Image: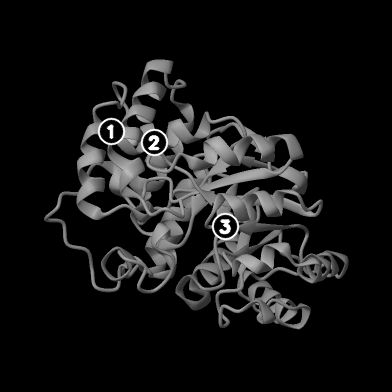
Amino acid sequence: MIFMEQRELGRTGRDVSVVGQGTWQLGGDWGEVREADAFGVLDAAVESGVTFFDTADVYGDGRSEQLIGRYLKERPDAPVLVATKMGRRAEQVPENYVLDNFRAWNDRSRSNLGVDTLDLVQLHCPPTAVYSSDAVYDALDTLVAEERIAAYGVSVETCAEALTAIARPGVASVQIILNPFRLKPLDEVLEAALAAGVGIVARVPLASGLLSGKYTEETVFAPEDHRTYNRHGEAFDQGETFSGIEYATGVAAAAEFAVLAPQGATPAQTALRWIIQQPGVTSVIPGARSVGQARANAAAAALEPLPQKTLDAVRDLYDRRIRAAVHDRW
């Protein structure tokens, strides 16, 4: 296995790799992925130094969790922390975020992953009111006491939700969209998380692939790919698809971003390197559908830090191209 920098994941007390492995793709929500290919991705990530897998109970209706569980059973030597998420299997109303449901959701995930205790469970972008509920955090503390889960965190859509969660003493980590096309967390969340000792997991790091620089306005995605059916938030929050940016705007901005890549690095690796070096970030979780993608993503951890002129150019690009084009909520 290749060594990769490890950072403490907030209040979990455990270290994880600065580049993790997101597994939304392995559930099939980005197009079909064969089991052998999924195992190849996970194996390539582990061999590249990745010690953090992120999944959810709704990725492929549990398929992603099941694949991870089977893989880790075959690789008991793999030192991987698995974070899953819960809450999106039910109607999105605060009344559903109660202890009995949490237990049922956890038990399903424990079965899928083949473990007695889940390493980290994150509320999966619930209704905003949930983040402020004392009863919700009491229930999460009960799950820890029952040893169903070792730690809990939240996945959020907005900076305000992140700040609300960070103020809770039991929250170990916050997962939030962060990439060169989504800079608001830099200004509002990361410093607060760092001061509180809360880990930050950066998701959608490539803006659904835009920052790879591989797509044009003529690119066609599969019908079952959320980049086809959720461009305007038809199925879930719009920010999860292309970071909420109108596609043509994103393609044009991505072309400018690609020019900033240092020699020997791809635009995708440059985006990941940019995230890794933001103060307060614990890990970034790009997805992958192939062994090559998994290895290339992990290799971003070995890049030299981007110089200040590149960081300034990213901010300028955001101000010119993105800021006025994104939805007001972000």
Name the residue that disc number 3 marks. Answer: 156
Residue plotted at (26% across, 67% down)? 228
Residue plotted at (66% across, 81% down)? 96
Disc 2 secondary structure class:
helix
**Alpha-carbon span between mark 3 and mark 1:** 26 Å
Q: Do we see residue 184 in this rendering?
A: yes
- What's the mark number on residue 181? none
Counting from the top left corner in percent of width and height, residue 151 is at: 76, 57
Q: Is residue 312 left or right of residue 17?
A: left
Q: Is residue 297 left or right of residue 106?
A: left
Counting from the top left corner in percent of width and height, residue 315 is at: 39, 29
Disc 3 secondary structure class:
loop
Name the residue that disc number 1 marks. Answer: 257
Counting from the top left corner in percent of width and height, residue 154 is at: 65, 58
For the residues carrying marks 2 and 3, which lies nearer the camera in this image?
3
Q: Earlier in the sequence, mark 2 or mark 3?
A: 3
- What's the mark number on residue 271? 2
**Alpha-carbon span between mark 2 and mark 3:** 21 Å
Q: Judge the density around disc 1: few (<14), some (14-19), many (≥20) Cα neighbours within 10 Å.
A: many
